[in-house]
Image (tube, grey):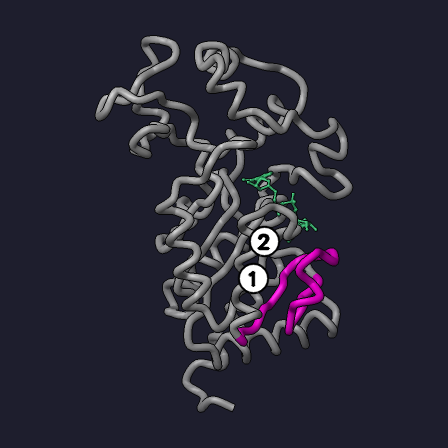
Amino acid sequence: MGSGVEQAVQQAATALRAARYVTALAGAGLSAESGIPTFRGPQGLWTRFGEPPMDGYQRFLRDPAAYWQEQLQPTSEGPRAELVKALETAQPNPGHLALAELEQMGVLRFLITQNIDNLHARAGSQQMVEVHGNRSKLRCIACDQRYARSEFSVSQVPPSCPQCGGLVKVDTVMFGEPIPSRWLQACHAEAAASDCMLLVGTSGTVYPAAAFPQMVKERGGSLIEVNPLETHLTRWCDVVIRAPAAEALPLLVQRLRALQGKPNA
Ligand code: NAD
């Protein structure tokens, strides 16, 4: 790890320690080292296969049975097959574990993640919103009740909600689908409470998630970016750690532990 990165990690540790209420926004880059491809960037799924249709949710509403038939059909090639295979075998990496540790240390109060891979929960993060849903769950679009996918039997297509009879789909938020309002409200409340936000592995191009760091900045808070590449959010950031999350975040935990017990600078 270069001295520029070491210095940035030290600055980040000092900023986190001085902050009153720290939140984090995580994106696909955090799970890249768990073997899950990002959408954008040099090896991104969309870079290699092209962008998917932007009206996925409208198609689902038009023909939910066809959506479910596709979901239940095994695929062996293409972007969906690649993503599904990676999701099935992925394990939390040191970056996920470090975020969970920051929460246990009382440093990180809340995590907003755009990831759908369930790796935060498996790493031990608890205070979070999965703002784009979780691929290991199903959700009723009428009452927002979520179900573990492994415990839900799809005996008819499309399946209906055992609680209210509404239409059930995979929890992952599709293009054109409204994000459940209580998730969005929680994100807005957390961004409003933050005086520091850690931005990990996100390109800052997907809204509304990309607006949360701007909210923090506009209210006088600070932003710390952990990303090997420049992003749309970089210009707003007070500290930039140009390194992979699985390397930078454990180092950040280490530096914070070293600062613990010392008086604030
Ligand atoms: P993105 O694909 O737009 O951008 C990924 C970002 O991660 C880039 O800025 C890239 O430079 C950075 N990155 C790559 N490797 C990294 C590493 N090792 N450490 C830190 N950063 C790294 O991702 P996004 O901003 O999250 O938005 C895309 C959408 O894709 C989201 O809606 C998300 O739901 C979805 N997505 C999720 C997963 C997942 O759950 N793991 C995977 C692919 C896409």
Q: Amino acid at mark 1?
A: Pro
Q: Total of numbered circles in the picture?
A: 2
The residue lying at 56 percent from left, 73 percent from top is: 222
- How far across and down, in percent of the image, does residue 101 sit? 43, 61
Residue annotated with mark 1 = 213
- Residue in front for this viewpoint, 244 or 73: 73
Residue annotated with mark 2 = 210
Rendered image quadrant of residue 51: top right
**Residue contact at pointers 1 and 2, CB within 8 angstroms:** yes
Whether disc 1's CB lies below 8 Å from ligand 1 is answered: no
- Whether 70 is among the magenta residues is no
Vertical position of residue 196 compared to residue 59: above or below? below
- Residue in front for this viewpoint, 63 or 84: 63
In the image, the segment drawn in magenta is 220-242
The residue lying at 55 percent from left, 26 percent from top is: 84
- How far across and down, in percent of the image, does residue 114 sit? 52, 45
Q: Amino acid at mark 2?
A: Ala
Of the 4 image quadrants, the one containing the N terminus is bottom right
Asked which secondary structure carries label 2, the reply is: loop
Vertical position of residue 84 compared to residue 119: above or below? above
Whether disc 2's CB lies below 8 Å from ligand 1 is answered: yes
Q: How far apart are the alpha carbons under marks 1 and 2? A: 6 Å
The residue lying at 61 percent from left, 77 percent from top is: 10
Crowd band around label 1 with a 10 angstrom C-alpha radius: few (<14), some (14–19), many (20+) = many
Q: Tell which quarter ligand 1 is in.
A: top right
- How far across and down, in percent of the image, does residue 98 sit? 49, 59
- Residue in front for this viewpoint, 40 or 122: 40
Asked which secondary structure carries label 1, the reply is: helix
- How far across and down, in percent of the image, does residue 69 sit? 48, 10
Crowd band around label 2 with a 10 angstrom C-alpha radius: few (<14), some (14–19), many (20+) = some
The residue lying at 54 percent from left, 51 percent from top is: 209
